[in-house]
Image (cartoon, rainbow, N blue to C red):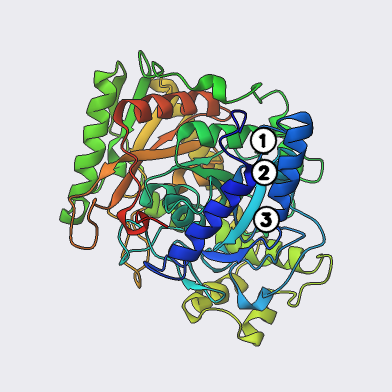
């Protein structure tokens, strides 16, 4: 832009052409719910400001794709549900406002698993989003619309939300970078909630540097979201200063052995992740294999409070919206019938659960014990980070339920982690490059700069990211 080779308008028009060519046509990725009808107009305004006074902010003209549970005043915010079709909040979510203030164009809202309930990105508002690397597979989720869109280059960068796996799952499945920050780093104000004990927003991008730049804009205190008070004193000047190619040299990294699978369906992931671990060792990292039993399926079943909190916090949101939302509770959603049938059992389960009672309190106590156990592993072994495959097996085909995901570990703890590409499975007829596989770096609270450095160092050493062939023909 400074060299006069590109304008914000040209960038917007290029992305709009790609969405037109690939989202509902061609490979039919089916990831975009709403395109911003004023995107070109907003880009023109940015170009005028650029001519008059230069760059307007760190995201000047950058096209951002938002998961459609993040509130926008100028486009509907549906959470992927027909029950909220055309619902438009009066105000932006704080995350959306910060992006606009940094000069970004919010280009479109992306599909998600309805109300972010699970990990296949299947909704009543749009249906099934598919993985650009293998059109027979899901893109992960629940932020799979953002992941598939960024992989297909429908926008520059994207924002997802993460309650259990939901930023890192599509990053792993779609050959991308996804950051789940420390709980409290990013405001949730204006985001349709699931579980405020575990909810956060996070960047999804094609490179670590792009994700770091987004994180800087998104992070910070919000008086309307009290958990962000913990961020005071824990924010670096920026995250881009952590982008060091030599960050792996001397880093002490623990490999959680129990988070690998040991069945035939896990073999491809194990091969790819172990190759990346060997590369890290070659780049100077000290690798320690940690043989401590951690069962992420058990953490999901016995510690995570997401289903217990959905009814409480979603109802509170729906009953206090401006303007009034068309539904006020999970019961209203069921009664109206405007939801995908695959999500009915999750909705009915959530209606029976609550944030009061012994079962919920027992989970909260187990959560504290998990946090302590996690930090003790790192302390006992003097570790800088933990690593493991985000998903023990390849992301599942459409029509199947996600299994064997490990992201619940840091989601329940509220600690930061970042997923980066680790490579691909063996190519097949439906996946000509192979299916992407992501490796997850996890750390102590507020250790985002350290994790970003480690992830960047691995990314620069491997360059595993390649665009999908399904959306690679000229527009």
Q: What element carries label 3?
A: helix
Where residue 249 appears, x then y in whole percent?
Answer: 35, 14
Mark 3 is surrounded, within 10 Å at the Cα level, by few (under 14), some (14 to 19) or many (20 or more) other residues, namely: many
Q: Can residue 224 be seen in this view?
A: yes
455 lies above or below 31: above
Do the numbered discs 2 and 1 sit on residues whose CB atoms are within 8 Å? yes
427 lies above or below 184: below
**Residue for point 45% across, 61% down:** 119
Q: Is residue 142 visible?
A: no
Pick whichever of labels 2 and 3 is earlier in the sequence: 3
Residue 104: assigned label: 2
Calculate the distance from the C-alpha at mark 1 to the C-alpha at mark 3: 20 Å
Calculate the distance from the C-alpha at mark 2 to the C-alpha at mark 1: 10 Å
Calculate the distance from the C-alpha at mark 2 to the C-alpha at mark 3: 10 Å
Mark 2 is surrounded, within 10 Å at the Cα level, by few (under 14), some (14 to 19) or many (20 or more) other residues, namely: many
Residue 39: assigned label: 3
Image depth: mark 1 or mark 3 in front: 3
Indicate left or right for 402 with 106 as reference: left
Indicate left or right for 450 with 358 as reference: left
Mark 1 is surrounded, within 10 Å at the Cα level, by few (under 14), some (14 to 19) or many (20 or more) other residues, namely: many
Do the numbered discs 2 and 3 sit on residues whose CB atoms are within 8 Å? no
Indicate left or right for 442 with 84 as reference: left
Residue 5: assigned label: none
119 or 104, nearer to the observer: 104
Where residue 46 appears, x then y in whole percent?
Answer: 72, 42
Residue tagged 1: 217
């Amino acid at each position: 832009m400074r060299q006069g080779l590109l304008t914000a308008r040209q960038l917007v028009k290029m992305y709009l052409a790609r969405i037109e060519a690939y989202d509902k046509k061609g490979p039919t990725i089916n990831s975009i719910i709403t395109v911003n009808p004023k995107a070109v107009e907003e880009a023109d305004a940015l170009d005028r400001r650029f001519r008059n006074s230069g760059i307007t902010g760190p995201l000047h003209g950058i096209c951002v794709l938002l998961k459609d549970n993040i509130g926008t005043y100028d486009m509907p915010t549906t959470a992927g549900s027909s029950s909220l079709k055309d619902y438009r909040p009066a105000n932006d979510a704080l995350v959306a406002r910060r992006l606009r203030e940094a000069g970004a164009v919010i280009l479109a809202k992306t599909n998600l698993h309805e109300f972010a309930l699970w990990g296949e990105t299947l909704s009543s508002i749009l249906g099934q989003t598919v993985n650009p690397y293998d059109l027979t597979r899901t893109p992960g989720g629940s932020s799979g619309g953002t992941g598939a869109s960024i992989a297909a280059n429908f926008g520059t960068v994207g924002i997802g939300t993460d309650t259990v796996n939901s930023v890192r799952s599509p990053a792993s499945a779609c050959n991308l970078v996804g950051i789940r920050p420390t709980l409290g780093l990013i405001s949730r104000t204006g985001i349709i909630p699931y579980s405020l004990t575990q909810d956060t927003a996070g960047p999804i991008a094609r490179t670590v540097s792009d994700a770091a730049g987004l994180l800087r804009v998104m992070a910070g205190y919000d008086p309307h979201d009290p958990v962000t008070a913990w961020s005071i004193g824990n924010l670096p000047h920026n995250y881009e200063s952590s982008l060091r190619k030599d960050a792996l040299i001397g880093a002490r990294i623990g490999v959680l052995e129990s988070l690998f699978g040991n069945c035939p369906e896990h073999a491809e992931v194990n091969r790819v992740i172990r190759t990346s671990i060997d590369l890290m060792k070659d780049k100077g990292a000290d690798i320690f294999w940690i043989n401590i039993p951690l069962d992420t399926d058990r953490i999901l079943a016995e510690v995570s409070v997401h289903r217990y909190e959905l009814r409480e916090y979603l109802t509170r949101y729906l009953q206090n919206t401006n303007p009034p939302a068309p539904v006020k509770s999970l019961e209203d959603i069921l009664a109206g019938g405007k939801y995908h049938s695959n999500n009915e059992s999750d909705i009915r389960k959530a209606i029976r659960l609550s944030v009061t009672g012994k079962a919920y309190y027992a989970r909260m106590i187990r959560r504290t014990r998990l946090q302590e156990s996690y930090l003790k592993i790192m302390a006992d072994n003097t570790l800088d980070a933990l690593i493991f495959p985000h998903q023990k097996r390849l992301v599942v085909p459409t029509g199947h339920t996600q299994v064997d995901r490990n992201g619940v570990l840091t989601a329940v703890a509220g600690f930061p982690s970042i997923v980066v590409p680790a490579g691909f499975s063996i190519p097949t007829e439906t996946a000509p490059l192979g299916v992407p596989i992501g490796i997850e770096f996890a750390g102590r609270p507020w250790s985002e700069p350290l994790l970003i450095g480690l992830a960047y160092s691995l990314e620069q050493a491997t360059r595993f990211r390649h665009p999908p062939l399904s959306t690679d023909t000229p527009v």
